[in-house]
Amino acid sequence: MLTKCSLVAAVLWISCLARQDSSAFSIQHRPRATLNSSHASASANTDHDADDTTTTPPSLLSSRREWAKNTAASIIATTGGLILPTNNANASDDDLIDVYFGCGCFWHVQHEFVEAERRILNRSDADLTARAGYAGGKAGALDGKVCYHNFNRVSDYGPLGHAEIVSLRIPASSYKDFAAEYVKLFDKNGFRPDQAGDRGSEYRNLVGFPGAAKSDLYLKQLVEASKENGDKLAFAEGLGDDPDRRALVFVMDSDAFAPFVAEQYHQFHDGFAMGEGYPQTYNDIAFRLAKAGTLGKSDCPNGMI
C-alpha cells in the first residue's frame, strides 16, 4: 500500500538492516516513575525490565521495516539537518524551550504532537514546530548529516546510535502538558503503539529537554505527568546509544544530544499501521513548510536510494 503522499515513481526497498547491538544488557529493577542513572545490572531482571522480544502486546502491528521491504516507497525531495537547541535549562515560563520525544516510529508520534500543538497552543499550520527526526546517539552527525537508511549507508542514523524522535519548540510553561501527551502514547503495560513491530535501539523510548536529569523542573514535571496517567513508565538517565526496553524511557540532555530533523518524505507522513492514513491537508504541510524554508534541510540521499 502506498501512502497518500506518494507523488513520484516508487522504488522497492533494498535491504538496509539496522545496527544490531550484540552486547549483553539488563536493566536494574526500579519502581515506575523513577529515574535511575545506573544503566546495567546483571541481576534483578523482571518482566518490567524485559526486552521487547520476550513479551507480546495484545494487538500486533506489522513492522514498518518489513512492510517497506515488500512495498514500494515514494521518493520525495529530501530535507533534513540539525535543529539547534537553545541553552534554556532555567527558562522562565514565557521562554521557548527545545524538547523531543521518542516512542517507536516517528510518523504516528509526529501526528499526535501536531494535534497537541494545535490543541494546547492554538498553533496554525505555519507555526507548527513538531518535526520527525533523530537523536540520542553518541556519534552525533557524520559528514554534517544524519539520514534515514539508504542503499549507500550515508550517515545512517542506526549505526550512529540515534533513535527516531519528534522535536518541538514550546513554551516552558507547557512542558508538563506535552509530557502528558507523550505518556498517553503508551498502553497500561508500557507498550508503545508499534511495540510488536518496530524494535531495537532505533525505536527506543527517550525524551530530551535542557539539562536532562539535572533539571529539577522538567524532570519533576515528566515524572508527575507519568504518575497522573497510569504510572506505567520508569525513567533512566540516557548516556547515548541506549538500548530498547519496554516501559523504560531514557532522559536525554537536549543540548548534549541535539536532535537532527529527518528528511522531508518522513515529515507529516501517514501512520505506520495499515489504514492509518491522515488527511491530505496534513500530508501537505511538509511541502508548505519546505517552501517557506522552515522545515529544515540537509544533503541526505533522496529517499532510500
Image: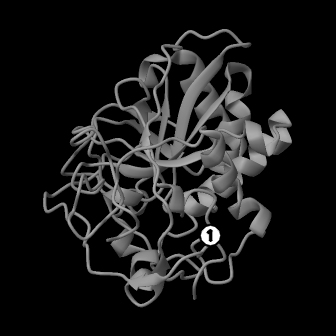
User: What is the three-letter code of the residue carrying label 1?
Assistant: Gly
User: Going by the picture, which residue comes out furthest to the left?
Assistant: 23
Circle 1 SS class: loop
Snapshot quadrant of residue 38: top left
- 22 left or right of 242 in image: left
Q: Residue at x 30, y 57 (%)?
A: 45
- On the question of residue 257 being in view, the answer is yes
Residue lying at 53% horizontally and 76% vertically, measured from the top left: 57
Does 90 appear above or below 269?
Answer: above
User: Which is nearer the eye, 149 or 183?
Assistant: 149
Instruction: State the residue position of label 1.
Output: 271
Q: Quadrant of the C terminus?
A: bottom left
Q: Position of residue 79 (x, y in %)?
A: 47, 50
Q: What percent of the width, then of the height, locates residue 53?
A: 34, 73
The reply to whether residue 189 is in sight is: no
Examine the rendered structure and indicate whether residue 117 appears above or below residue 188.
above
Q: Quadrant of residue 178?
A: top right
Q: What residue is at 61 percent from the left and 64 percent from the top?
A: 269
In the rendered image, which quarter contains the N terminus? bottom right
Taking depth in this image into account, of 267 and 248 the one nearest to the observer is: 267
Q: Nearer the viewer, residue 252 or 81?
A: 81
